[in-house]
Image: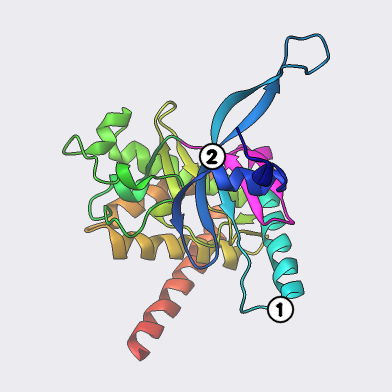
Amino acid sequence: MLSSSSSSKPPTQQLLQSADLISQGAEAAIYKAYLHQFSSSGHGVDHGAVLKASEPVLLKHRFHKHYRHPSLDASLTRQRIAGEARALMRCMRSGVAVPGIRMVDVNEGVLGIEWIDGKSVRQLLPGGAELEDISEHEEVDEIHENGTADPIADYGVSRDALMDMIGVEIAKMHLADIIHGDLTTSNMMLRKKKSDVVLIDFGLAYHSTLVEDKAVDLYVLERAFASTHPESEPLFAGVLSAYEKRMCKHWLPIKKRLDDVRLRGRKRSMVG
């Protein structure tokens, strides 16, 4: 039961107060919470209504930045919450596996999305089990679980099948002209019940039809594989193979631009 002081707070603030903090970064705090709904006897009057627990949700709270002017901070927060929600909606309409939206409060800077029960791809691949990089949907006390030599096997899929699923979901996202902006193996979840890949964390996502933006999205993921997972070339090659098949005629211009982006990246590395 909420106290009288807490019940006077806006519903979103009450929800955050009762939620469990999972992680906090410079831009947002991530919580696991439960949305509740009123359940009555069905007579149309809620005398004696009780709170009925629903499924867990993930709350992303873009808290106030005190170093910014309040009006600018509020405007940027609203834009980013609304932009992330729009990107998720566009992905859902296009059949991309992303978390469903459960609530949006642009004034409080809170986006509530479906809780994905699973592990990040980073946690499941060799070299990616560092504690300091926790996925949006992962709780700290689960990080040390590793029951088998290859944890992917617990989900009933092979490593090659996992790479195929990643490539297909990215292709569907790009065909919908959504650029993720932060494609890493931390931002992909392998879901337990369905054994499918879910793309998460669309905080930097935007809409674009440009081949360049899609090529850069892929390059970011390629660098993430190379920097996080040892001997990852065959893994990323599997992702690209599935991506190519799904993109069909759209693949060749993206491939050409990806080669150009790689070349630019190597030149920057040599210059320092």
Above or below, 67 relative to 96: below
Part of the protein shown in magenta: 92-116
Residue 173 sits above or below residue 260 on the image: above
Which residue is located at x 54 percent, y 60 percent? 28
Residue in the foreground of this view, choosing between 74 and 171: 74
Disc with the residue nearer the chain's start (2 vs 1): 2
Residue drawn at (32%, 60%), measured in percent from left and top? 132
Residue 118 position (above or below residue 60): above
> Which percent across, then down, holds residue 147?
19, 35
> Which label is found at residue 33?
2
Q: Determine the CA span between mark 2 and mark 1.
A: 30 Å
> Residue 262 lies in what quarter of the image?
bottom left
Taking the view exactly as shown, the residue that stands out farthest to the right is 44
Q: Where is residue 253 in the image (x, y as percent from the top left)?
A: 56, 62
Image mark for residue 69: 1
Q: Residue at x 64, y 44 (%)?
A: 14
Say what secondary structure mark 2 lies in.
Answer: strand
Q: Neighbour class for label 1 at 10 Å: few (<14), some, many (≥20)?
A: few
Return the x and y of residue 118 as percentages of the image width and height.
39, 36
**In the image, residue 101 lies in the stretch drawn in magenta:** yes
- Which quadrant of the structure image shows residue 95? top right
